[in-house]
Image (cartoon, helix red, strand yellow):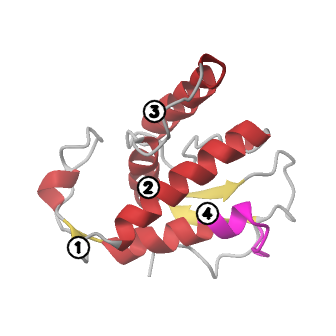
């Protein structure tokens, strides 16, 4: 089971701020997050929204091991991209907070990801991931690539 470092930093260094995640949890998060990318309000925003959505759908297929291509460095590089990310995270978190305690495995298996969910997935794990994404956006995290004590969604 692989893991991927989630960061908005474009510079590779041991001081990069972010957190490690299990690939399977990150892939599920990105699949659901892609479904919460807001529809563009104008033609100017449409290309960026569709690029982000398509990237996350690709990254969430389940075929990347140890390096899920979340492209958050690119998404967070512009105010428009950060706005799309923040809106998607906020929308998904709101839904997860009112969801049942476990997401049904049969429904998750309909999401078009490779692999198979054999068990229901605890909703609280995805809420933890969403909060970590918000904290990363808000600059509240201090974890670096060298630290593994905080892995959202893995508790």
**Quarter in which the C terminus is drawn:** bottom left
Q: Give the spatial CA distance, label 2 vs label 1.
A: 16 Å
Residue 24, by quadrant, is bottom left
Residue 2, percent from left and from top: 49, 57
Q: Residue at x 19, y 49 (%)?
A: 109
Q: Is residue 34 left or right of residue 119?
A: right
Assign a secondary structure to mark 4. Answer: helix
Q: Residue furthest top?
A: 43
Q: Is residue 32 left or right of residue 83?
A: left
Kindly indicate whether the residue at mark 4 contacts the one at mark 2 (C-beta within 8 angstroms). no
User: What percent of the width, then of the height, locates residue 70?
Assistant: 58, 43
Residue receiving disc 4? 133
- Asked if the magenta segment contains residue 34, the reply would be no
Residues marked 4 and 3 touching at CB (< 8 Å):
no
The numbered disc on residue 29 is 2
Question: If you read the primary sequence from the N terminus, does the residue marked by circle 3 or circle 2 appear first?
Answer: 2
Please, what secondary structure does the residue beneath circle 2 have?
helix
* Upstream in sequence: badge 2 or badge 4: 2
Give the numbered dot on residue 62: none
Distance from disc 2 to disc 4, alpha carbons, whole Å, reads 10 Å
Nearer the camera: disc 4 or disc 3: 4
Do residues under tags 1 and 4 come within 8 Å of each other at their CB atoms?
Answer: no
Start-end of magenta stretch: 133-144
Question: Helix or strand or loop: what does disc 1 sit on?
Answer: loop
Q: Give me the residue at 54% from left, 45% from top.
A: 68
Q: State whether residue 15 is above or below residue 48.
A: below
């Amino acid at each position: 089971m692989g893991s991927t470092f989630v960061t908005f930093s474009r510079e590779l260094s041991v001081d990069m701020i972010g957190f490690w995640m299990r690939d399977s949890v990150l892939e599920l998060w990105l699949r659901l997050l892609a479904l919460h990318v807001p529809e563009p309000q104008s033609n100017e925003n449409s290309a960026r929204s569709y690029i982000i959505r398509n990237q996350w759908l690709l990254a969430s297929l389940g075929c990347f091991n140890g390096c899920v291509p979340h492209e958050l460095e690119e998404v967070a590089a512009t105010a428009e991209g950060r706005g799309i990310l923040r809106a998607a995270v906020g929308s998904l978190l709101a839904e997860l907070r009112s969801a049942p305690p476990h997401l049904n495995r049969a429904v998750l298996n309909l999401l078009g990801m490779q692999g198979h969910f054999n068990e229901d997935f605890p909703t609280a794990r995805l809420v933890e991931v969403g909060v970590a994404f918000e904290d990363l956006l808000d600059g509240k995290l201090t974890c670096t690539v060298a630290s593994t004590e905080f892995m959202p969604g893995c508790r």
